[in-house]
Image (cartoon, grey):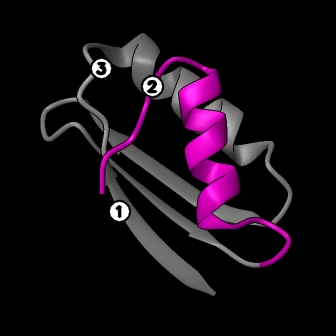
Amino acid sequence: MTTVTYTVPKIHCGHCVHTIKMELSDLEGVQTVSADMNTKQVVVTYDAPASEDKIESLLAEINYPAQK
């Protein structure tokens, strides 16, 4: 299992947090997702077939581009 932390500057509210958690949780291989609107951080724990590239692509696709 791998855990990665991203800074996502576009997190502004509970809806943002909910959307990120729901979308990333649907990605095959993702085990846990936590998002915090105060720190603007998203922590994802995953196994294959999920990857950092897939997670970052999905975040960009749903309009929450990530920074590491």
Reading the chain from its start, which is encountered first: label 1 or label 3?
Answer: 1
In which quadrant of the rendered view does residue 15 lie?
top left
Q: Residue at x 43, y 50 (%)?
A: 34
Query: In x, y percent, where is residue 54?
Result: 70, 53
In the picture shown, does residue 68 fall above or below 25? Answer: below
Reading the chain from its start, which is encountered first: label 3 or label 2?
Answer: 3
In which quadrant of the rendered view does residue 66 lie?
top left
Residue position marked by numbered label 2 in the rendering: 64
Q: Residue furthest bottom?
A: 1
- Taking the magenta stretch, the answer to whether it contains residue 56 is yes
Mark 1 residue type? Thr
Mark 3 residue type? Lys
Query: In x, y percent, where is residue 59?
Result: 56, 34
In the picture shown, does residue 60 fall above or below 28? Answer: above
- Taking the magenta stretch, the answer to whether it contains residue 55 is yes
SS of the residue under disc 2: loop
**Marks 3,2: beta carbons within 8 A:** yes
Residue position marked by numbered label 1 in the rendering: 5
**Marks 2,1: beta carbons within 8 A:** no
SS of the residue under disc 1: strand
**Marks 1,3: beta carbons within 8 A:** no
Task: Give the CA separation, mark 2 to mark 1.
Answer: 14 Å
Residue position marked by numbered label 3 in the rendering: 10
Reading the chain from its start, which is encountered first: label 2 or label 1?
Answer: 1
Q: Residue at x 35, y 62 (%)?
A: 5
* Stretch of the chain drawn in magenta: 48-68
SS of the residue under disc 3: loop
Task: Give the CA separation, mark 1 to mark 3.
Answer: 15 Å
Query: In x, y percent, where is residue 62?
Result: 61, 20
If the image is split into quadrants, where does the C terminus sit?
Answer: bottom left
Mark 2 residue type? Tyr
